[in-house]
Image (cartoon, helix red, strand yellow):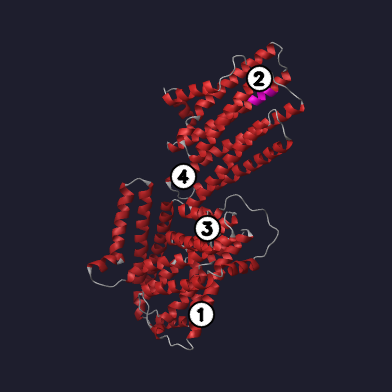
Amino acid sequence: MDLFSILGLLCGLALFLYGMNTMGDGLEKLSGGKLEKILEKLTNNTFKGFLLGTAVTAVIQSSSATTVMVVGFINSGIMKLRQGVGVIIGANLGTTVTSWILSLSGIQGESFIMKLLKPESFSAIFAFVGIILLMFFKTEKKRNLATIFIGFAVLMVGMEQMSAAVEPLKDNPVFASILTIFNNPVFGIFAGMLLTAIIQSSSASIGILQALSATGTITYSMAIPIILGQNIGTCITALLSCLGAKKNAKRAAFVHLYYNIIGVTLFCIVFYGSMMFVNYSFLNDTVNQGDIAIIHTIFNLFGIVLLLPLNRVLEKLACLTIRDKDEDFENPFLDERFLNTTAIATERANSLGIKMARLSEGTLLGSLELVGNYDEETAATIMDNENMIDSYEDVISTYLVKLSSRELSESDSKIIHLVLHTIGDFERISDHAVSIVKVAKEIDEKKMKFSKEAQAGIEIMMAALREIINNATLSFINNDVKLAAKVEPLEQVINRLRDKLKEAHIERLTNGECTIELGFVFSDLITNIERVSDHCSNIAIGVIETNRNGYDAHEYLHELKNSDDIQYNADYKSYKQKYALPKKV
């Protein structure tokens, strides 16, 4: 094997890894994070977790990626360790799908159907269909499908190139003598483990082994221990991802490690121990790509049958390894492990944004209840909520800035855009809620009483505020453009209420019907209410403009107020009547 053959092998490996990564990304984006959402909502049913882990891994083509997701879920407190065990076991079976796909390169036959099934035939078809979809279709779903097809074609081309590069080795006596080392199970397991740990992909290392099998020099006695070692080596990714994580996340990574170590150990005891009584004549036979896929599947089925019922034992072993210590409370925020899986990272950020929005709305509504009915315990809760909302804004914005630098689907990009443009307004709403609490406290401490007219005006304005915050929050949560369109006309009505209440207040001051001190409190209250409505307007405009693929609040408002929008005018008239002030205010 000369230098050019080595370069050909490296090129084939690069194409293989790139194709696998591209295909996995396309599959993940096409699923839109749905499989990950199912994982997140997992019940305590271990068998259901096993099936889901198998399905997710079969789709994204990486048991390491599935396990890292589980580590992230557990670290964030979304999933319990017990729930994750079944998923991790299922991931090991799901990864065998890749070896079966790669085994297609070993198909033999001269019939039309057999020729069509060979990689050099269907890869060309996949690549051509993929490039047509990529060039002539603009929809996100079609482009993701194109990425899958092209990624698969590149993967198979890489596989073929690796096989072609190592083909001269079949007549190389030095290579044959090196391979005899792997007849020793210990050396074979170590070699498979080391190769997989270096490239951090059991699917890729299986692919390399399948490529080498094309030389006709790999026997069952060599392949079996290498495959066993590959299953242990794939645990390195999860172990690296749990560095700095909480104890249960570390335990999840060790469940993955123990499952494979125990599975390999038991398989070795049963298989190699039985050789004392049974002569396995096939061990000296050479293997092909399909045989390797069979060995890989048999080993994983062996482990599942023995260890899935013992999932509690695996959990216990992990808990004994990572013992309980004093630890911070469960982290409700975002885990950076998800950044490599953009669909799920976007979903987590959006979920936390929704949680922040609901908390902000609840904080504001709670502050309104304190006006005229002040309660110290409720006020303290509102202060705590405001601090939490500040923290949410900080972590969400930091996380989304990091996420926005990744390759995103169009839908994920829109979600990130919307969340980034609205969380600041939800945070400011909570600030105004605190200001309203302070006003309510001053009213209570000084035993202030508004006039009947002023009190009536405040109640009408607060009723309008309750409706506008509800509309703005729901439009954000549900991405509801129609509901968002109802916010701006109500905001204009609230502006009008503020102006009229200020005019009436000045008149009462002039007539000596109101004190200056009470006037300051009154003015602070209606000003905070009006400013909250401004932020509600910003949120609604964010929803509308994001769905219009743009974001320019001033341009939108200018267009709206200078156009004869029938729906806007109808909504404005309806709200104006609904929140009309008494004749004497």
Instruction: Tell me: 308 left or right of 166.
Output: right
Neighbourhood count class around disc 2 (C-alpha, 10 Å): few under 14, some 14–19, many 20 upward: some
Foreground label between 2 and 4: 2
Labelled pair 4, 3 in contact (Cβ < 8 Å): no
Label 1, on which residue?
A: 268
Q: Residue at x 55, y 42 (%)?
A: 354
Question: 382 above or below 281?
Answer: above
Q: Nearer the viewer, mark 2 or mark 1?
A: 2
- Residue type beneath disc 1: Cys
- Return the residue at label 3: 69
Judged from the image, the secondary structure of the residue bearing numbered disc 4 is helix
Q: Is residue 254 visible?
A: yes
Residue 534 x/y as whole percent: 56, 29
Quarter that holds the N terminus: bottom left
Give the mark nearer the N terminus: 2 vs 1. Answer: 1
Q: Residue at x 51, y 61 (%)?
A: 49
Pick whichever of labels 1 and 4 is earlier in the sequence. 1
**What kind of residue is marked 3?**
Met
